[in-house]
Amino acid sequence: MLVEHKKPFFTGVLYGVSFLAVLAVIFSPIFGEGRNGLVFSDDMFNKLSKGSSYFIPKIIKGNEKNMGKQFSVTISLDKPEVAEKAAGQFKKAGSEVQLDAAKLKISGDLGKTLAAILKDADSMFNNDADKLKADYGYDGKEVLQSWWQALSKMDKAFKKDGKIEESNQIGSVMKKAVEPAYNFFGIQSQQVSDKIGIMSGLLVFYVVYTMWWGFAIYFLFEGFGLSMKKAKVKKEI
């Protein structure tokens, strides 16, 4: 393919080469702690996501209305060993538990039970797995996994029994406390307000960099004499 228009062709080459040069810099481990640009930005956005997902204090406050509210529910977990772990955790939370293989009958004070779960979730959200290890004797993520499995079954059981308010309380603790604590464990939390400059800069760079490559292709095609034009409308006689 011959170059028909040299000026747009060389403009396209310049855009393309500079695009690849910047790409090489992005993939270089020069962004601190041996990270490249993608890992650096991913780490930063994970920290900001964690900072904006800390709902546990609000849920703890909302759980105060559940103090003294009695509940009783029967759930079946996937395996007896999973049920055994969950039974021990509920007992430590102050609930009464009857264990039969993989089946649990749990009863007690809903507010106190959820308060104990929220306390564990808060420790893990703040990366304090050692506290849960000391309390239960096994890894903190296993503790949260056990809580999540039990809460998920309780949520379904309450819905089936028409106890929508209890179901909503369980679902809120599960989705806004246990899940974020599990998913963001090990990540340091940061607020968007503390990183607004660099975050805005990265977003602007992403848009500009995407357009950069588009212009490179556009000018190269123009240099080769390839262009897109609106087709002429044929008039019927």
Image (cartoon, rainbow, N blue to C red):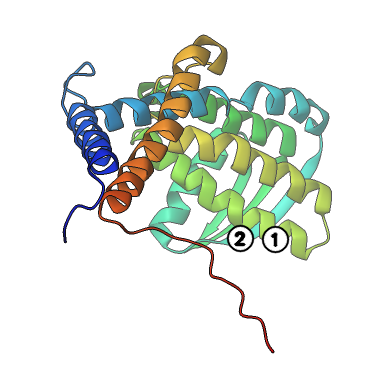
Label 1, residues with CA under 10 Å away: few <14, some 14-19, many ≥20: some
Q: Nearer the viewer, residue 93 or 178?
A: 178
Residue at 31% across, 48% down = 217
Q: What is the spatial separation of the Cα atoms under label 2 and label 1, in whole angstroms?
A: 7 Å
- Residue found at x 36% / y 27%: 41
- Residue 62 in percent (x, y) is at 77, 28
- Look at the picture and state if 94 lies above or below 234: above
Q: Which residue shows up at 51% across the image and 10% down it?
A: 194
Q: Quadrant of the C terminus?
A: bottom right
Q: Position of residue 27 (x, y in %)?
A: 19, 32
The residue carrying mark 2 is: 75
- Residue at the outermost top position: 194
Q: Which residue is mark 1?
A: 157
**Nearer-N-terminus badge (2/1):** 2
Looking at the rendered structure, the kind of residue marked 2 is Ile
Instruction: Assign the N terminus to one quadrant of the image.
Output: bottom left
Q: Are marks 2 and 1 in contact (CB under 8 Å)?
A: yes
Give the number of callouts. Answer: 2
* Label 2 Cα crowd, 10 Å radius (few <14 / some 14-19 / many 20+): some
Q: Is residue 105 above or below residue 38?
A: below
Residue 220: give x, y in percent of width and height.
27, 48
**Residue 148 in picture, x, y percent from top left:** 53, 47
Q: Is 113 displayed left or right of 70 in the figure?
A: left
Tag in front: 2 or 1: 1
The three-letter amino acid code for the residue at tag 1 is Ala
Is residue 222 found left or right of 25 in the rendered image?
A: right
Does dot 2 land on a helix, a strand or a loop? strand
Q: Is residue 186 visible?
A: no
218, 184: nearer the viewer: 218
User: At numbered mark 1, what does the secondary structure look like: helix, strand or loop?
Assistant: helix
Front one among 130 and 26: 26
Whether 17 is drawn above or below 75: the answer is above
